[in-house]
Image (cartoon, rainbow, N blue to C red):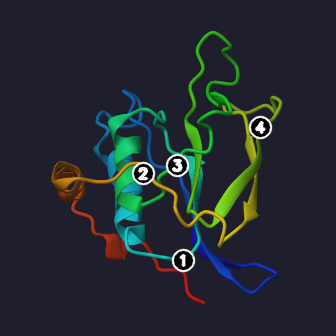
Amino acid sequence: MHTLIRLPCGDAVQMHVLHPAPPSPTENEASAERDAEPIVVARRLEKTNQPVIVTGDLNDVAWSATSRLFRKISGLLLDPRIGRGMFNTFHARFPFSRWPLDHIFHSRHFTVVKIQRLPFFDSDHFALATTLCFTPDKNTNRTGLKPDADDQSRAQSILQKKDTHPKEVPAPKN
């Protein structure tokens, strides 16, 4: 889902909710489709100065090469879980085997007030509740991961494997 949310203050926030197909023997033998979806959104966002939130079940862990590449290319540099906890959201029914597959990334326009994993609710995932505060003037000097030429090349290669382009991601309209 790609939408524009108008805040009470009048500012507009791009919201992208993703759920790429998981790589698994029963659903998808390779990770190419899963890898392409976040990268195509990242390419769409790499030059925007607008407030942005990207969230969803990305079927990938935060420390993977694809997740790091998404953060570099999109400019959504910080993972809000860093320093706050692991927040393993999958698999809710197997306590001995849990991974953080559900994510939220946001632009510098926000600060994290609270992030928490919610209790079991009869799903294979736990819900991840995050409270963000819109603070557009507070975080103007944030730094983090930056894409280099190899990152740009790898992102392009991922998109070419699935024959996709950033223009395929709808640009939310005002």
Q: Is residue 94 left or right of residue 48?
A: right
Residue at position x 33%, y 53% from top? 146
The answer to whether the residue labelled 3 contacts the one labelled 1, judged by CB atoms less than 8 Å apart, is no
Residue at position x 39%, y 55% from top? 37
Dot placed on the residue nearer the N-terminal end, 4 or 1:
1
What secondary structure is marked by label 2? helix
| Alpha carbon distance from label 4 to label 2 | 21 Å
Q: Residues within 10 Å of mark 4 (few under 14, many from 20)?
A: some
Camera-side residue: 108 or 42?
108
What secondary structure is marked by label 1? loop
Quarter of the image holding residue 136? Answer: bottom right
Dot placed on the residue nearer the N-terminal end, 4 or 2:
2
Q: Amino acid at mark 4?
A: Gln
| Alpha carbon distance from label 1 to label 2 | 16 Å
- State the image coordinates of residue 14 (x, y, percent, origin top left): 58, 73
Residue at position x 54%, y 81% from top? 172
Quarter of the image holding residue 63? Answer: top left
Camera-side residue: 15 or 163?
15
Q: Is residue 127 left or right of residue 28?
A: right
| Up-down relation of residue 3 to residue 92 (above or below) | below
- State the image coordinates of residue 13 (x, y, percent, origin top left): 63, 75
The residue singled out by tag 1 in the image is 50
- State the image coordinates of residue 9 (x, y, percent, origin top left): 79, 83
The answer to whether the residue labelled 3 contacts the one labelled 2, judged by CB atoms less than 8 Å apart, is yes
Q: Mark on residue 78?
A: 3
Q: Is residue 22 left or right of residue 158?
A: right
Q: Residues within 10 Å of mark 1 (few under 14, many from 20)?
A: some
| Up-down relation of residue 131 to residue 126 (above or below) | below
| Alpha carbon distance from label 4 to label 3 | 17 Å
Q: Mark on residue 116?
A: 4
Q: Residues within 10 Å of mark 2 (few under 14, many from 20)?
A: many
